[in-house]
Image (cartoon, rainbow, N blue to C red):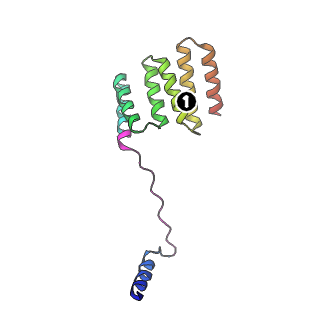
Amino acid sequence: MRILTLLLALLAGCAAVPPGVPPAPPAPPQENLAVASLVDSAHNEAAAGRLASAAASLERALRIEPRNPRLWRELAAVRMQQGEYAQAESLAARSNAWAGSDAQLRAENWRLIARSRDARGDADGARAANETAERYAR
């Protein structure tokens, strides 16, 4: 028993960080590489005018990270480009539901909602959405 106690004391001393050596910083959270690849693919597809393919890539990314508000925003933007204004507005609202305290993202979503409402002929709704966007942008 005494040998075990001595051995544990020696091992504990080896595990200590020498004085003056700063502890290692915590590892940053790893980005999901599959999601990053799908987002890159979506950007390339959208730039090439292949909006259906871009949307499909973003939908796959959302199956991996369904609570990612940036992915919802990206898909909303693609739907806006496709002329699917009501769906774009709905997706931007869903992004806002997951956005937490990200005021910049909320402002972007409200601007997209404003454009969607304007495209559907809802001038009053667009104006209200733009006012909300400005409140978040401050």
Q: Is residue 55 left or right of residue 120?
A: left
Q: Residue at the spot x=47%, y=64% of the render? A: 24
Rendered image quadrant of residue 27 = bottom left
Q: Is residue 64 above or below residue 89?
A: below
Q: Residue at the spot x=43%, y=84% of the render? A: 5
Residue beneath disc 1? 108
List the single residue furthest toward the front: 1
What secondary structure is marked by label 1?
Answer: helix
Q: Position of residue 19 (x, y in %)?
A: 51, 76
Q: Position of residue 126 (x, y in %)?
A: 60, 18
Q: Tell me the quarter of the image containing the N terminus.
A: bottom left
State whether the magenta stretch is mostly helix, strand or loop.
Answer: loop
Q: Residue at the spot x=48%, y=75% of the render? A: 18
| Label 1 neighbour load within 10 Å: few <14, some 14-19, many 20+ | some
Rendered image quadrant of residue 121 = top right
Q: Residue at the spot x=51%, y=27% of the render? A: 92
Q: Is residue 66 above or below residue 24?
A: above
Amino acid type of disc 1? Glu
Rendered image quadrant of residue 93 = top right
Q: Is residue 106 left or right of residue 2?
A: right
Tell me where the magenta segment starts and ends, as one range. 19-36
Q: Tell me the quarter of the image containing the C terminus.
A: top right
Q: Where is residue 73 in the image (x, y as percent from the top left)?
A: 48, 30
Q: Which of 98 and 39 is in front in this view?
A: 98
Q: In this view, does 65 lie above or below 81?
A: below
Q: Position of residue 9 (x, y in %)?
A: 44, 82
